[in-house]
Amino acid sequence: MLSDPAITVSAVEYRDRLTVVQAYRFASDPTPGQVRALLRHAGAARLAYNTGLDQLARALKNWSDFRKGERKGRRMGFPRFKSRRRYAPSVRFTTGTIRLEDDRRYVRLPRLGRLKTHESTRKLQRRIAEGRARILSATVRSEAGRWFVSFTVEVQRSIRAPARPDAVVGVDLGIRTLAVFSDDRPTATNPKHYDAARRKLTRSSRAASRKRGPDRRTGQQPSNRWKSANAARNRVHHRVTARRRDAIHKLTTALAREYGSIVVEDLHVAGMVKNRRLARVISDAGFGEIRRQLAYQTVWNGGTLIVADRWYPSSKRCSGCGVVKAKLRLSERVFTCGECGLSLDRDANAASNLASLVEHVVVAGSGPETQNGRGADHKTRPGRAGGCETSTPHRAAPAQVGRGPSPSDERITEIMRSR
Ligand SMILES: [Zn+2]
């Protein structure tokens, strides 16, 4: 199942329903004729973009908002002409007949007609049949030699409560292990899909490099053999991505369903990835993706995600007595406290510190009023849970408004200062 609830554009809450906009993505098997039609449409869409219709306004706005500092997220440059080479062919439909067939094996799209899906559309079709989902648009896109159709859907989700609403877990994301938890939950091992597939990648890359590839300078066209070797290489990449996504989804879903509060560190992923030695392994572990998924998963499951300040010394602080070490080398895998003699695994110590950060705060914010009227949330100081991409409006600025810093708020500042 490749449904990827990737974009949580908005989260409007009612008493027992949560309306979110999310994406469902299905691999599809278009007929050769449909592939030709898709490529034609994608080409036409590109042409339309390039002649500056409609979509260009949005791109310009992204660029100017970014310049004015009004837009979060990835850097937005001045819109560029789309080239056939650089862009994966993609068509987006917003009007006309867009629906899933009842047999859950076909989707119907404007101009293209019935498009076979590679996997069952059950999850989305069921919601639509129950009247709990509405398709807003559909995009067909070619990725790694396969066509995917993704629907942007407005979904009414019933609000869930975590299995253990009062439980707090600190999650320390690591490189050697994917995540270490503050309670007795077993460590999530790093799947390292990339490493496992690296030999395959090397082999397939070498195979491609032996064939006559494209050359922009000489205008050399790729041979058919190169094209097929290159497609094989892309498939390896794609498989790695899919497996990693699956592992991360399972981890974040399990956490959000169980714990009322989840605390993570605000790792500066973009900055860390710039460090070339760490980049591959960090990108592979998908730190940023874990954070992003936890942000919307906690909203969907009625929990809270707390993001510790980037400078909170979760590793250098002793989870027993609170003393903060001046220095802790990355090679020191066991944390030993000079004050109280506590000695435990470095990552477990960090996870405990993260969890205890919340336990302090929970006392502070627990007032009778809740922001969303269901009382499941906001016992804690708001973290920057939304991150850049996900907007979780109800978490924007609750407890702090109109209230001075509570004692435990001060304690946090203190902890952070004593670094
Ligand atoms: Zn200590």
Image (cartoon, helix red, strand yellow):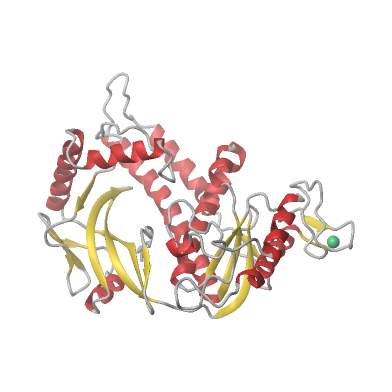
Residue in the foreground of this view, choosing between 319 and 401: 401
Measured as percent of width and height from the top left, residue 180 is found at 65, 63
**Left or right: 150, with 311 as reference point:** left
Q: Quadrant of ligand 1?
A: bottom right
Task: Classify 303 as above or below 92.
Answer: below
Which residue corresponds to the image point at 14% horizontal and 43% vertical from the top-left? 40
State whether residue 252 is above or below residue 329. below
Say which of 116 and 355 sits in front: 355
The answer to whether 143 appears left or right of 277 in the picture is left
Q: Position of residue 49 (x, y in %)?
A: 20, 38
Q: Position of residue 140 (x, y in %)?
A: 23, 53
Residue 124 sits in which quadrant? Answer: bottom left
Q: Please tell me which residue is depicted at 61% across the width and 42% down the height of the picture.
A: 278
Residue at image position (58%, 46%) is 268
- Residue 207 falls in image quadrant: top left
Q: Residue furthest top?
A: 218
Tell me if I can see residue 347 in this picture.
yes
**Relative to residue 186, is residue 33 depicted above or below?**
above
Using the rendered image of the protein, determine whether residue 87 is visible from the camera's viewpoint.
no
Q: Is residue 87 left or right of residue 317?
A: left
Residue 22, image x, y percentages: 34, 62
Give the quarter of the image for residue 343. Answer: bottom right
Residue 359 falls left or right of residue 110: right
Report the quarter where the N terminus lies: bottom left
Q: How many marks?
A: 0
In the foreground, 180 or 196? 180
Q: Residue at x 23, y 64 (%)?
A: 135
